[in-house]
């Protein structure tokens, strides 16, 4: 799977692959592999990208055209 939206968002924000790779703590070549779909992206990177760009993970994965992230669910405390 090619993650075209990763590239589109990066370019829309005028960022280089090297800059994003540093944010994710990976080599630039590894990030390039993610964009091209050569390597599967780890879940923690997917969440990091979604938070950074302010979009949903489904948007990044091409599952929806709606970029708005979902509301955050607060953790409920268990009654003891």
Image: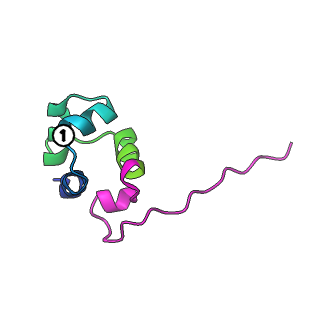
**Does residue 53 lie above or below 80 as drawn?**
below
Task: Give the farthest residue toward the right.
Answer: 80
Give me the residue at 42% from left, 50% from top. 51
45 vs 62, left or right, is right
Q: Is residue 1 visible?
A: no
Q: Quadrant of the C terminus?
A: top right
Q: Is residue 58 visible?
A: yes
Q: Tell me residue 10's x, y (percent).
A: 23, 51
Residue 56 in magenta? yes
Give me the residue at 14% from left, 32% from top. 29
Of residues 79 and 48, the one nearer the viewer is: 48
Quarter of the figure with residue 69: bottom left
Q: Tell me residue 67's x, y (percent).
A: 36, 66
**Does residue 39 lie above or below 58 as drawn?**
above
Q: Tell me residue 77's x, y (percent).
A: 76, 47
Task: Give the farthest residue toward the bottom.
Answer: 65
What stretch of residues is rendered in magenta?
Answer: 52-80
Task: Give the farthest residue toward the front.
Answer: 14
Residue 67 in magenta? yes
Q: Which residue is mark 1?
A: 17
**Does residue 37 lie above or below 68 as drawn?**
above
């Amino acid at each position: 799977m090619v993650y075209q939206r990763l590239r589109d968002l990066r370019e829309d924000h005028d960022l280089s692959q090297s800059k994003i790779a540093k944010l994710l703590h990976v080599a630039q070549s590894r990030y390039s592999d993610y964009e091209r779909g050569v390597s599967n992206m780890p879940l923690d990177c997917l969440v990091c990208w979604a938070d950074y760009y302010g979009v949903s993970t489904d948007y990044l994965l091409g599952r929806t055209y709606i970029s708005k992230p979902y509301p955050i669910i607060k953790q409920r405390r268990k009654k003891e």
